[in-house]
Every structure is written in structure tokens, then in C-alpha cells.
């Protein structure tokens, strides 16, 4: 399963693709079971150059009764920095944030590797 | 303190106006991210995990009160009310919005601040001894020369697209407080028997994936030829530095592959062809710059202060602060006061807007209007009367800025790591916090003595882990955060690259491992040996045994 993420151009906020639009909470992100649908969304996102920067697909999986990013780095992006619990998306709280915070296990973020390669 | 002249002021204003137009074009879709990215980076604006990050240059780590207040105002107005001081003595703001960036650059420019030379393959913002102009062992103020290099290197057309970034550090005394051996060029000022100033010139230092300590390529360069000699070094590097491989592009790889002697020969050959008078700084300009760094307003005082001595007798906490955070000044009756940004359990190098304002107020009232940023991620008030140290201490303590731990185990360098940085493999901050909490007891910390722990969240080594007495490198092991420990490094006069002690440890094993190493040290040390001295004498074995005993 995949989700599509980027940083919003105007303010850098982490955003997730949801049915043609961008949302700020991972809990509202669209989850693609189908690889080709994910790639179609990625291509559409990349054409929105005044909205989002460097969109990329991330792996997501079912854990603890919900869907969360597989990689630790992507969960951290969806939550905020661990040294400042009052900063970033985690500050808003809610069931989706709690689910992300509980998720464990880690894997390499393919998106991150691609980002570094582009530098 | 040196103030930017009219040329600099006009340049910063132009630059901010230019960036405003570039941002407008990017937001309107007139240019792509690919076109815009190098432009924003040249103004210090990065895109990181959660937001944009603005890296503001603090040349040679020197600020006046108005500048520090401006940084506080920006942190409060455009960020989340704090900033992060880095090992390059810059300030990073981690929650910046692109749409605010032009207003921020305008506001910075009004106080002579900017993000120029904080990114890209150019000569970066210079660092210098934070004790500059205040310490008795200094032969000359390194900032005079650092400022000359800054003026020469800013937007230098020949050196704006080097093979890779280029960092220079300058120290004005034999004691190296600027880590000059880990820089692309390290400069140490000396004065000969006749009183002539010269530079010992080092080249080819650097950390990252392949760490090297710089080698001396010239023992005594007459100081007046600094700029022409810099040009010769940069020309050799620009010509022969590798552009085909990002990991081999720094000057350290060139110096290592040619050998320091051959590199030096090529520099001398290039220098011999140089029209020195066309490049070197005229004496009049040097004198103008120098005048900006001569501190004025020192009072004539006795060397000892009754108030300072009485405060030490009356308060154990103040006495401890005096032992670790207060250092001797060249001017009788004055001291350097270190402001610790390493409160136990806090993020190393972080400083709130309120704390910045307080330090700015203290600098204005007690320190001839000057503040320094150290590469060890602390602040420093360089010119405080001993009589005033008790009042300064009380004010700092009320704001959590008086932790008496300079150079001790909880004075840890940590890069922002995976909590913020797009390049990081692992977090650095929580590891630093764990270790500091474990050694919170100031009596224990003092018993352990000097122990420099440096943590990087990836191999780029912003946290200088290679030169930590204990270095900690975050690595990604199948997607999980692991930490590789090195021992025996130093960035000081005894500079050395640390040795890897064994297999990487899981996050929750790092602080206990430090504890185990400290126990070995306390058991093994002879006399007044520091941790690093004991390590070098005994070798890694006893430390390794303590950490990995369970694995056998």
C-alpha cells in the first residue's frame, strides 16, 4: 500500500494527497492499494508546481488496527520532532496521531533515498 | 564591534530585494523548484522534514546586542519562538515559511545579518576563536582577518562554484579553540621575535565520510599576504578538486591524494605567479577593519575582585559556575562568561527568544555590547567585570542558562538529526538528552572532568563525532536507528580522529554504554588524566570489554 506526500510550497508544511487535494493529517491521506493508481496520483501531484514540492510515494501498512507509514522517518514527518512534543502535527492530538505515535518497526524510506540522490 | 560598511549594507538590501522577486516568481509558478532551489539555498533557506529552515550566518561567531535581539524577534515572529545554534556558529530556525522569507531577509539586513555563504559550493561563513580579543594568549584578533576574508570571499566570482563547499577557521593564539585542524583551511596567527605577524596555514582537514586532519602547508606566511595565498590555495583546489564524485570533492581528498608536500608545492607555484599587490589587502583597509574590533570601554580595575571571591565563598553553586564557565580575561578585573545552552534534558544549542533577549540585555549592560557563539553550541559574554559575574550568573540561572558544565560530560554537541534534518539517518537530540540526564549530578560531572561527547545523525558529521572524546554516529540499520561509538578523538590542540569501538548499539543502549565507559575511566585513570588521555594510554580494549561484555 502507498500514500503520497510532499511539503507545501508556501510554508513547507508536510502534506498528504487525498483525492486530488492535499491534507495536513496523515489520518486523512488517501491510501492506494493499487500501484498504478498511486503513480497516476504522483504524476498529477508533480504537475501542481505552485502547490507542493517534490511529491513522492511512501509505503504504508496496517498496524495496531490502522494504517501508518512503514518508515520511521515518515512517521516522524507525520508527527513532528520528538524533542518538542508541542511542535508539529502531534500537537493537535487525536486518534490518528495516537496511532502514529504507537506504531513501531522501521524500514528505510525509499522517498528519502530518492531525495538525497537528487541533491 | 565591527559594523558592516555602506557597501555591505547596500549589498544586503539589494540581495533581499532580489530574493523577494525570486520568491514571488516561484510562488506564482513562473520558475520551477529546480530553478528556484539553488537561489533559496544561496540565501540559507533549506527545505527540511517539517518546514523550511533558515540558516543565518554569524560571521566568526560575533554578535552585538541589537543583532541578537533581532534574531530573537525573528524567532518569535516567524518561527516557534526559538533557534538552534550550530557547530558552524550559525543560527538555524526550523519552522520558517517560504512566504515569510523575504520579510525575514529584509529585517535581518537592517542589522547587518543574512544567510549568505551558509549553503552551496562557495567559501562558507568563517569561524574563529570565540575568545578573540579577550584572551591573554592571543597574538592578534583573528576576527580582523576573518572579516577580511569574508569581504574578499563574498560573491567571489571565481570561487562561487567550487567542486564542493569550503570552510575556513581562524585562531589568534597557540591554543586552538576554533578546531582549525578539521577545516578545509585552518589559520593560526603567530608573531615572530621581531614582532611580525604570520599565519601557520593548514589545508585539507574535514570530517564527513572520510575524515582527515589538516596538514601544515606553510609554517609562516607573512600576514599581509593572506588573501593572495588564499587565492592560490583556492585556485589549485578549483582546478584539481574532483567534480565527478560528490564524496571525493572536498579539498581533503585532493590534499590526501597529492600528499600535503606536493599540494603545498602547487600552491606556492600558483602563488609565485600572483600579482600580490592586486589581491592583498591594503594597509589602510586592514587598519579600518582592525579599528572595528578594538573593544572600547574597559575600566581600569584591580586583577582580583572582592565581590567575585565573596560570592564563591558564599555559594557552592556559584563557585562551581566560576570553576567551569568563567575564564580568565587579558584585561585585569574582567572575565569571559560562558552561557551554557546545554541545560540538562534540553536540546543542545537551542535558545528561546526570551533567552536570546536576556543574553542581549546582559551583553549590553555587562559585556561591552558583545556576544559570541561557540562552535561547541554555547554562547559567551566576552568582557564581563569580575565584580559583575555574580549578577550575570543570577540572571543566567533564572533563565536556565547557567548550567555549570562547559567542557564536561553534559556539554554535548548534537546536530538536529532526524528530528529535523532531511539528510539524517537517526536522531541525535534524544541521545544527548539521555546522556545529560544520566550525568545530571554536577558533583559527578566535575569528578569525571573534561569529556567531550559529540553526536551526529549521519555521516556528514555536522555534530563533529569524529573528534569527540566519545563520538556517536547515528546510522540506519535496516531502517532502525543505531549508533556507532568512537573513542579518543579531539578537535583541540591534541586533535585526533576517534577510533570505532565496536558494533553499533541500539538507541537505548547508548547512555548505559557511556556510563560503562566512564566507570572504566574512573577505575583506570592515573593522576589528573582526562578521559581521552586514559583512552589513549590504555587503548580501546578495557572500554570495549565493558560495553560488549554481555555479547561474549
Image: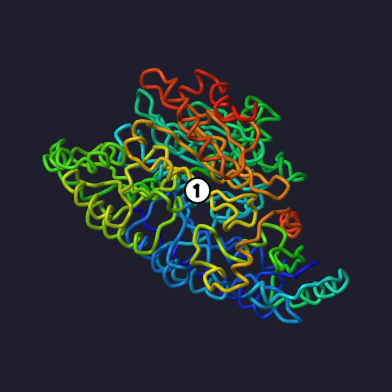
Q: In which quadrant of the rendered view does residue A96 lie?
A: bottom right
Depth check, front residue: A95 or B193 = A95
Q: Is residue B16 left or right of residue A37?
A: left
Q: Report the residue at 70% width, 68% height from top.
A: A65
Is residue B205 left or right of A113 when viewed as pictured? Answer: left
Provide the secondary structure element on which disc 1 rests: loop
Give the left or right position of residue B450, taking residue B35 as reference: left
Question: x and y percent of residue B201 in the render?
Answer: 52, 32
At 63% across and 51% down in the image, what residue appears?
A: B424
Number of marks in the rendered image = 1
Give neighbour class at mark 1: few <14, some 14-19, many 20+ (Cα, 10 Å). Answer: many
> Is residue B416 shown to the viewer in this render?
yes
Q: Name, please, the residue furthest toward the right.
A: A36
Q: Position of residue A70 (x, y in %)?
A: 72, 60
- Residue B285 seen in the current view: no
With respect to residue B539, does B392 lie above or below?
Answer: below
Letter of the chain that mark 1 sits on in the rendering: B
Please tell me whether residue A96 is drawn above or below residue B58 in the rendered image.
below
Which quadrant is home to the C terminus of chain B?
A: top right
Q: Quadrant of residue B143?
A: top left
Query: In this orientation, which residue lies closer to the viewer: B122 or B192?
Result: B122
Location of mark 1 (residue):
B88
Q: Give residue B470's position: percent from left, percent from top.
A: 52, 34
Residue B166's x, y, as percent? Answer: 59, 45
**Nearer-the-camera pick, B259 or B478:** B478
Residue at horizontal 54%, vertical 27%?
B546
Q: Nearer the viewer, residue A30 or B527?
A: A30
Q: How is the image coloured?
A: rainbow
Amino acid at each position: 500500500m502507498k500514500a503520497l506526500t510532499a511539503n507545501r510550497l508556501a510554508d513547507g508544511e508536510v502534506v498528504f494527497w487525498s483525492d486530488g487535494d492535499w491534507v495536513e493529517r496523515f489520518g486523512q491521506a488517501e491510501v492506494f492499494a493499487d500501484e498504478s493508481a498511486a503513480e497516476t496520483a504522483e504524476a498529477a501531484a508533480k504537475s501542481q508546481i505552485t502547490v507542493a514540492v517534490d511529491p513522492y510515494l511512501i509505503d504504508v501498512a496496517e498496524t495496531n488496527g490502522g494504517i501508518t507509514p512503514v518508515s520511521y522517518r515518515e512517521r516522524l514527518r507525520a508527527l513532528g520532532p520528538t524533542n518538542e512534543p508541542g511542535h508539529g502535527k502531534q500537537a493537535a492530538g487525536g486518534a490518528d496521531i495516537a496511532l502514529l505515535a504507537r506504531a513501531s518497526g522501521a524500514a528505510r524510506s525509499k522517498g528519502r533515498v530518492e531525495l538525497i540522490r537528487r541533491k | 564591534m565591527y559594523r558592516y560598511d555602506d557597501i555591505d549594507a547596500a549589498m544586503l538590501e539589494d540581495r533581499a530585494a532580489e530574493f523577494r522577486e525570486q520568491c514571488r516568481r516561484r510562488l506564482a509558478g513562473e520558475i520551477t523548484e529546480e530553478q528556484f532551489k539553488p537561489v533559496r539555498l544561496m540565501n540559507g533557506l533549506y527545505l527540511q522534514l517539517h518546514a523550511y529552515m533558515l540558516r543565518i550566518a554569524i560571521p566568526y561567531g560575533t554578535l552585538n546586542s541589537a543583532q541578537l535581539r533581532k534574531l530573537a524577534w525573528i524567532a518569535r515572529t516567524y518561527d516557534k519562538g526559538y533557534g538552534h545554534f550550530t557547530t558552524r556558529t550559525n543560527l538555524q530556525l526550523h519552522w520558517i515559511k517560504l512566504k515569510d522569507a523575504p520579510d525575514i531577509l529584509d529585517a535581518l539586513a537592517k542589522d547587518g545579518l543574512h544567510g549568505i555563504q551558509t549553503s552551496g559550493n562557495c567559501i562558507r561563513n568563517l569561524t574563529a576563536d570565540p575568545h578573540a580579543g579577550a584572551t591573554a594568549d592571543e597574538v592578534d584578533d583573528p576576527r580582523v582577518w576573518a572579516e577580511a576574508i569574508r569581504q574578499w570571499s563574498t560573491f567571489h566570482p571565481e570561487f562561487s562554484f567550487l567542486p564542493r563547499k569550503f570552510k575556513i577557521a581562524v585562531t589568534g593564539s597557540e591554543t586552538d579553540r576554533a578546531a582549525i585542524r578539521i577545516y578545509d583551511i585552518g589559520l593560526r596567527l603567530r608573531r615572530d621575535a621581531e614582532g611580525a605577524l604570520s599565519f601557520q596555514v593548514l589545508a585539507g582537514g574535514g570530517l564527513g565520510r572520510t575524515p582527515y586532519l589538516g596538514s601544515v602547508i606553510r609554517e609562516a606566511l607573512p600576514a599581509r599576504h593572506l588573501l593572495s595565498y588564499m587565492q592560490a590555495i583556492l585556485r589549485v583546489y578549483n582546478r584539481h578538486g574532483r567534480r565527478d564524485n560528490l564524496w571525493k570533492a572536498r579539498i581533503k581528498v585532493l590534499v590526501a591524494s597529492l600528499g600535503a608536500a606536493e599540494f603545498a608545492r602547487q600552491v606556492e607555484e600558483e602563488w609565485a605567479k600572483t600579482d600580490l599587490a592586486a589581491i592583498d589587502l591594503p594597509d589602510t583597509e586592514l587598519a579600518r577593519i582592525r579599528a572595528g574590533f578594538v573593544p572600547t570601554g574597559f575600566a581600569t580595575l584591580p586583577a582580583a575582585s572582592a565581590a567575585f571571591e565573596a560570592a564563591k565563598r558564599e555559594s557552592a553553586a556559584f563557585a562551581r559556575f566560576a570553576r567551569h564557565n568563567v575564564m580568565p580575561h587579558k584585561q585585569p578585573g574582567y572575565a569571559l562568561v560562558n552561557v551554557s545552552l546545554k541545560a540538562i534534558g534540553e536540546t543542545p544549542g537551542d535558545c528561546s527568544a526570551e533567552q536570546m533577549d536576556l543574553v542581549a540585555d546582559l551583553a549590553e549592560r555587562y559585556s561591552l555590547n558583545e556576544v559570541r557563539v561557540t562552535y561547541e553550541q554555547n554562547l559567551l559574554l566576552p568582557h564581563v567585570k569580575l565584580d559583575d559575574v555574580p549578577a550575570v550568573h543570577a540572571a543566567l540561572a533564572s533563565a536556565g542558562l547557567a548550567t555549570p558544565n562547559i567542557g564536561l560530560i553534559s556539554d554535548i554537541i548534537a546536530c538536529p538529526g532526524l528530528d529535523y534534518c532531511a539528510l539524517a539517518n537517526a536522531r541525535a537530540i534524544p541521545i544527548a538528552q539521555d546522556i545529560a540526564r544520566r550525568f545530571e549530578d554536577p558533583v559527578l560531572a566535575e569528578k569525571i572532568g573534561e569529556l567531550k561527547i559529540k553526536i551526529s545523525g549521519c555521516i556528514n558529521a555536522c555534530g563533529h563525532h569524529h573528534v569527540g572524546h566519545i563520538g556517536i554516529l547515528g546510522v540506519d540499520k535496516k531502517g532502525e536507528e543505531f549508533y556507532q561509538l568512537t573513542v579518543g578523538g579531539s578537535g583541540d590542540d591534541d586533535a585526533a580522529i576517534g577510533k570505532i569501538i565496536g558494533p553499533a548499539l541500539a538507541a537505548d543502549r547508548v547512555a548505559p554504554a557511556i556510563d560503562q565507559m566512564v566507570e572504566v575511566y574512573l577505575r583506570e585513570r592515573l593522576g589528573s588524566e582526562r578521559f581521552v588521555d586514559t583512552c589513549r594510554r590504555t587503548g580501546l580494549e578495557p572500554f570495549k570489554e565493558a560495553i560488549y561484555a554481555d555479547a561474549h
